[in-house]
Amino acid sequence: MLLSMTGYGRATLTDGGKTYTAELRSLNSKQSDIRIRTSHNLHVHELELRKLVLAEVKRGKLEMNLEIADDGSTGKIRVDLPLLASLSKNIYFNLNTQLPESTLDGLVPALLRTPGIVESGMADLDPADWNSIQEVTRQCVSRLQHYRHQEGTALADDLRTRVRAIMDMLNEVGDYAEQRIAAVRERMQRHLDDFMGRANVDKNRYEQEVIFYLEKMDIHEEEVRLLQNCEYFLEILDNEDDVKGRKLNFISQEMGREINTLGAKAYSADLQKLVVNMKEHLEMIKEQLANVA
């Protein structure tokens, strides 16, 4: 089970002649955060709304819109005229000598977009409204989570395919191991013959140097660790936790270290090709993990 960080949910509830609408968007983010846009009479409940949403969503940058429309007062709006007059007066007095007149002409329409100046629907919130708001918020979060689970399933399929592709390429590494060692031995012997002559070579010392050199080239530990990391990645990917993006990201970093070491020790064109292909899949894995909760 995997959860995407991006998603969208919307819910509408009609009760007691009022319509409650909740809309929620989720975007990628390393931290959990929520921005709530609503009428001023709901600001007192903003902390409770944050807790309600974040308890379920857990990770992502969230934007939430909440609206309440009173069907019995359709078309009615409330304008805070004292606040509008105060803002207009202060701006005109303080800025009319600093800004061009054409700018000041559009001041009132701009001020009307200021939060709290214009409110639609009802002005007061009663306990029944708060209960309905909580319910429509739960429905909205549920639909957002359903959307994120659907996206997460597609992400998991892609991640699983790419990790298994790396494991398949890792199985091919052994095909080049003997060729690689034989090629290194041949190259070292050829260089010795060219520069020192066969008669001047101490065979025992030569074998010791070859063994030392081949031990430095040994990639068995890297193969084992990379395989273990891939298997652990798949294990975490398929467990029941919803939020596991950070853990998968840490595992992918360990995979990258082992792949890089394989490349540094390759000494084989064929093995380098495998490493390049592994890195390509790993980069796609990292890109996908940026969207995993």
Image (spheres, rainbow, N blue to C red):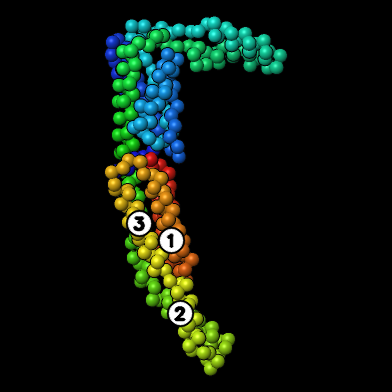
Q: Amino acid at mark 1?
A: Glu
Q: Amino acid at mark 3?
A: Cys
- Going by the image, does 235 lie left or right of 83? left
Pointer 3 or 1: first along the chain: 3
| Cα–Cα gap, marks 2 and 1 | 23 Å
Q: Amino acid at mark 2?
A: Ile
Q: Answer with the quarter of the image where residue 181 lies.
A: bottom left
Residue 15 lies, with reference to residue 274, above or below; the image says: above
Disc ID at residue 230: 3
Residue at 50%, 16% in the rendered image:
115
Residue 116, image x, y percentages: 49, 13
Count residues near mark 1 (Cα–Cα under 10 Å), then give few for <14, some for 14-19, many for 20+. Answer: many
Residue that mark 2 sits on: 211
Quadrant of the snapshot with the N terminus: top left
Pointer 2 or 1: first along the chain: 2
What kind of element bears circle 2? helix
